[in-house]
Image (cartoon, rainbow, N blue to C red):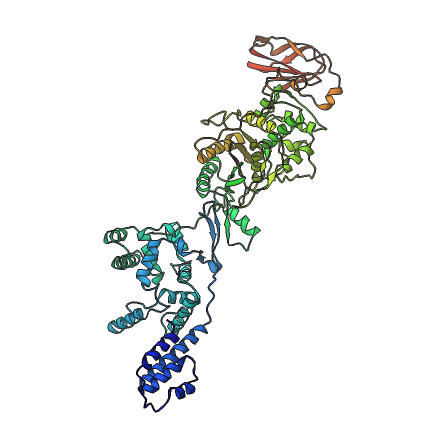
Amino acid sequence: MSRTGWLCKLGALLKRRERPDTAVSGRDLTERSGGGALRPLFWMAARLRTPLLVLLIASVLAGKALDQWVDATVLPQTLAETSVEVRDRNGRLLRAYPVGNGIWRMAVRVEEVDATYLNMLRAYEDKRFDTHSGVDVLAMLRAVGQAVLNGRTVSGGSTLTMQVARLLEDGSTGRWAGKLRQIRVALALERKLSKQEILNLYLTHAPFGGNLEGVRAASFAWFGKEPRRLTVAEAALLVALPQSPENRRPDRSVGAARVARERVLQRSREAGVLTSEVAQQAAQARLPKVRRAFPLLAPHLGYQLRAAAPATARFDTTLDAALQEKLQAVLLRRAKAAGPQLSAAMIVADHQSGEILARIGAPDYTDTVRRGFVDMVSAVRSPGSTLKPLVYGLAFDEGLVHPDTLIRDAPVSFGGYAPQNFDGAFRGDVRVRDALQMSLNTPVVTLTEALGPSRLMAGMRQAGMRPQLPGGKAGLAVSLGGVGVSLQDLVQLYAVLAAGGTGLQLTVEAGGESAVIPRVISPVAAWYLGDILRDVPVPRGARAGVLPFKTGTSYGYRDAWAVGWDGQHVIGVWLGRADGTPVPGVFGAEVAAPVLFEAFAALKSDLTPLAPPPPNALVLTTAELPQPLRQFRARNDVFSDVGEGAPEVVFPPTRARLALVEGRLSLKLRGGRLPFTVLANGVPVARGLRSRDLDLPSPGPGHATLVVIDADGQSARVTVEIEEKG
């Protein structure tokens, strides 16, 4: 009931005792007082002719003055800056940033805090919080009485609302002026805000030692978790700390922290919040000895997101914090094993939804030796051989080749550009699938020349990549890594291949819609690539034939890559030095591929099956293919002279055992067009030969594969065993 309503009721009750000989009329007093709500009071007091008149008038005037005093209060700012946060797909904290002056103050609401903690807080700090109007008169009288009897302060009389008032204004507690100001602000806060809003302010601003403000920052710093999952012992410590945050810090004064925690537990037990057994068990729990570091998962991503939207306070991502943490450990261990200065990066994405589940820019963000602060997910590097699948996919769609088409692996020259295979050897006619599985260079450059480098660049951009050309113009070397791309770009390309030649733009922002990638290659071409690459030799101990993947090593051993996919996920791995220094001996197949397979094992226990072949896929042998697809020939070869047919080795027969004299090898040929080139175990041993009876230097004892290539690029091969004799 309002004060005015109460006075009216009192006036009505006293009116029953009206006496006819009243010397002063109620009307006169009412007029002198100004009328209004005080009219019944003055009328009643005049009738009684008693000192109650003075008391009632004084109390009403004091109440009215108090109302005006409280209503005129200028409240402090209640919207304080809180830490910018980056969270994962489940709301788990990946990284937070301190506010001004290095303070950790994290946004928190009542519903995000453990209920037992809140009950213990009320029992210890303000048991009548839900009923008082900002000031607990009984608590203040008790505090004053205890101080008088003991000659010192025994307990405080401040309510949680008064503490909030002090925290918002950063005011003192000891001086009467400061206490009066807290009372005024507390009363005003209770009129403006709900109880839950006031409690939210306390949970956000309460001090917990050092640069920690708020229960959420304290829970992370002392226990490494959100405050909704506190144990009773942890909750008791967090209730006790704000009373004397520096003196009770468990990392500096274990004894004081333990005593304070026990006091909270005892009072909570007395208030019925805890049972004696629970309180006793909590009192025996260990206290934290050190402050924990705040989560530092996906720090490079956090920096990137903040740079793009500096005014945003919270970033919700598609990452999975548990997976990110697990793969971070895998990457760090593998990088340390590979070399002291090696960095590494990884992306895990769901190519069906377009969501990035893990994004690791370096093994350890704080490792300056490895330059962990450099985000190698976004760094532009040479992709080595990892673009070859796109070349073959485009060639499949152009009708240039089929996986079982024969293509020549022989010395070639395109305007002075003569690519070599990684091992320096050539293998003559090979199937396209073998050329891709062995990552041969001359076949893919030959196909790039047939397609045109600009077609390859267009396919990369169409897939969502952002390639950077060193010279500004694409050449044939693009297919061998002569272009700059990032790990993000490469995983985007393979996500498109994995999704059947089209798909979604990969994203880390939760709740948004991913852009649809226009079709890059046909479903048939994409299936051909998966069918070929799943038979690439796997690292030792890995299961073969189930995971399509491709490795790559950039020129000078600067970058080692591995990218692979199953029916749902795609993973990309990079290893190298962040400063681009060569690392001799670092190959994609040897250092990056094992990390790729371990990452898939950490992601899931069983791989998601690949899609079945499309109905129009040609699953045929070379001999069963249509004639134009059996052997690849460049378009301009159609108009050239085919010569005498393919060369044939007449002597020696295959699997022959030869005893050579004076280290010379005799070779007799039939057919083919002069001149001939002869390879022994992939290495050229003679060029420009214009005879079909050849006398060649021996390649050395043991098994040897001899390949003869004619002027049209047609080839023949024979395998023999050589026994050298003097």
| Image coords of residue 276 (percent x, y) | 23, 54
Horizontally, is 253 left or right of 552 in the view?
left
Write the residue at 47% across / 52% down. Answer: 96
| For residue 382, above or below residue 297 | above
Q: Can residue 427 be seen at all in this image of the molecule? A: no
Tell me where residue 222 appears, x and y as whole percent.
37, 52
Q: Nearer the viewer, residue 715 or 85?
A: 85
Residue 449, picture quadrant = top right
Q: Is residue 447 toward the left or the right of residue 247 in the image?
A: right
Place of residue 463 in the rendered image (x, y in percent of width and height, measured from the top left): 61, 36
Q: Is residue 125 left or right of residue 398?
A: left
Report the residue at 27% width, 54% height from top: 274
Q: Quadrant of residue 242?
A: bottom left
* Percent of width and height locating residue 545: 50, 24
- The reply to whether residue 601 is visible in this rendering is yes
Left of 713 or right of it: where is 252?
left
